[in-house]
Image (spheres, rainbow, N blue to C red):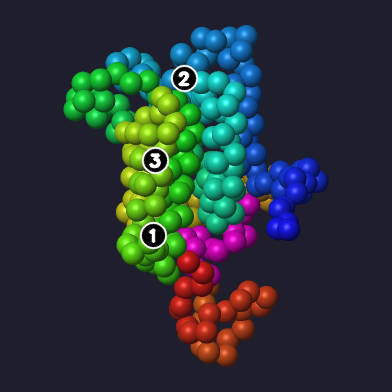
Amino acid sequence: MPSFPQFNPARIRSYVFRLPLCTRVLAAVMICLYIATIPFPWLREFGQLEPAKMNFTQMHRLNLFPLMHLNFFHMIFNLIALTPLLERFESEFGTLVTLALFTGPFGTIPGGVYTLLEKFVLHSNTIVMGASIWVFLLLSAEVMKTHKTNPTFNVGPYKIPTWTTPLILVLVTSFIVPNVSLLGHLCGAGLGYLWASGYIKFLVPHEKILRWVETKLNLLARLPHYVSVDQKTYGRYGVLPTSSTPGAPLGNMPRSPEPGQKLGP
């Protein structure tokens, strides 16, 4: 008989307690906002992205719409999909970078592009909300790393480019899940491709500024589960420091077999 993995609440509890700080905060905000919309349903209308209402007095919607959800199942499914991706991103780039991006350009840019396309190209007013735009953004960024080591995967006799996986998921989701925004998901995925390709790395605050803030406020010592600029899993942009001297030690850090070679996907 095949053995199936058993549901283990202790492992889930351990995983949740190990989540880095910004991932915890964003997840908690999503849950709290959903709970708040039960007695105050007007909060959902206040935060949802409605293209027809967008003007300079409604810019808060670009920051709030990924955090708002239509109902409990919408919120919980997005939370389950987003948490491991966001945790991986924060472990790689640090808490300050994650906070700056996901409370700023990772919401405003895809939301702004979506609004412009809806208003001036499609002449429509489809309302969107939910963290799925971040899910496809992070999926696109992750799959671009995989694409470098595994450019294709096989489906029967066909070879499918690995980088197209999020686009396939966007299409499948739009067919099988009711009331999802194909355009909104594509806007999120597009920004993820740009991020992974390095075209928008300028959105990240300069490392000297991040180090100054961390040192000045002593964030690493004061905040539990905080991920420092210097203590991320893969270094600032996924590359470990290496030495040009073959015998130069790197302490406890694993070293590439060739000087300057990137480790991992």
Give the SS element for disc 2: helix
* Location of mark 1 (residue): 155
Q: CA distance from mark 2 to mark 1?
A: 41 Å
Q: Residues within 10 Å of mark 1 (few under 14, many from 20)?
A: few
- Spatial CA distance of label 3 from label 1 is 16 Å
Q: Secondary structure at mark 1?
A: strand
**Is residue 44 located in the magenta-colored stretch of the structure?**
no
Q: Tag 3's secondary structure?
A: helix
**Dot placed on the residue nearer the N-terminal end, 2 or 1:** 2
The magenta-colored residue range is 227-240
The residue that mark 3 highlights is 172
For badge 2, the amino acid type reads Gly
Horizontal side of residue 252 vs 41, given as left or right: right
In the rendered view, does 238 fall on the left or right side of 201? right
State which quadrant residue 29 falls in. Answer: top right
Q: Which residue is rendered at x = 72% and y = 48% of the image?
A: 15
